Image (spheres, rainbow, N blue to C red):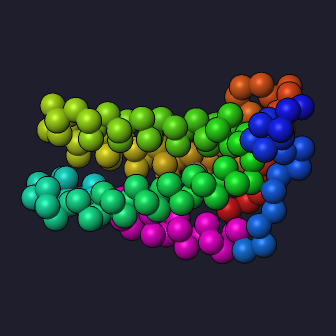
Amino acid sequence: MSLFSDLLFPSEPRALGPRRGIKIVLRAVHVLCAGILTGAFVLEVAAAFREPWLAATVASGVALLLLDLHESGAFLLQVRGLVVAFKVATLGALLALPALEAAAPWILAVLVLLSVIFSHAPSKVRYHVFLFGDRVSGARTKG
């Protein structure tokens, strides 16, 4: 394998001692911020008051993504990574297309539902390597 593929897809997932504790705290912050952000859209709170919650939701989500990618890039090929990619793309479309703002409460509600469903799905679903499963072994850490 090349240096690039070894970095992206290590033969053994990279370890980080306090990974589980860090993910629990980050996930709690992320869920709190996403919930407040969704509620702010539902209650039609002014954009200026939503922006800090949007920034915190994005920042905590990026931190969670980086933590998963540190372990192995195979995360992006697993169902859980594909769901994250879909959420990022949907949120990006929502932010980039002002015409979608009227649908924002519904879009965010769907993203929250998808997040809850897939975070509580059986591990054989979440950790299934959708693409290149015969050549890539995905990380399987819990949490």
Camera-side residue: 11 or 114? 11
Side (left or right) of 44 relative to 103: left
Residue 24 located within the stretch drawn in magenta: yes
- Where residue 68 appears, as percent x and y from the top left, is 66, 53
Q: Is residue 39 magenta?
A: no
**Image x and y of residue 138, in percent:** 78, 42
1 up-or-down from 48: above or below: above
Residue at x 60% of width, y 54% of height: 66
The part of the image, by quadrant, that contains residue 38 is: bottom left
Which quadrant is the N terminus positioned in?
top right
**Residue 140 picture location, percent across and down:** 79, 51
- Range drawn in magenta: 19-34
- Image quarter where the C terminus lies is bottom right
Rendered location of residue 62, percent (x, y): 50, 55
Residue pushed farthest front?
Answer: 3
Q: In the visual, does 125 lie left or right of 134? A: left
Who's the residue at 77% across and 37% down the image? Answer: 4
Q: Note whether residue 125 is visible.
A: no
Q: Magenta stretch mostly in which secondary structure? A: helix
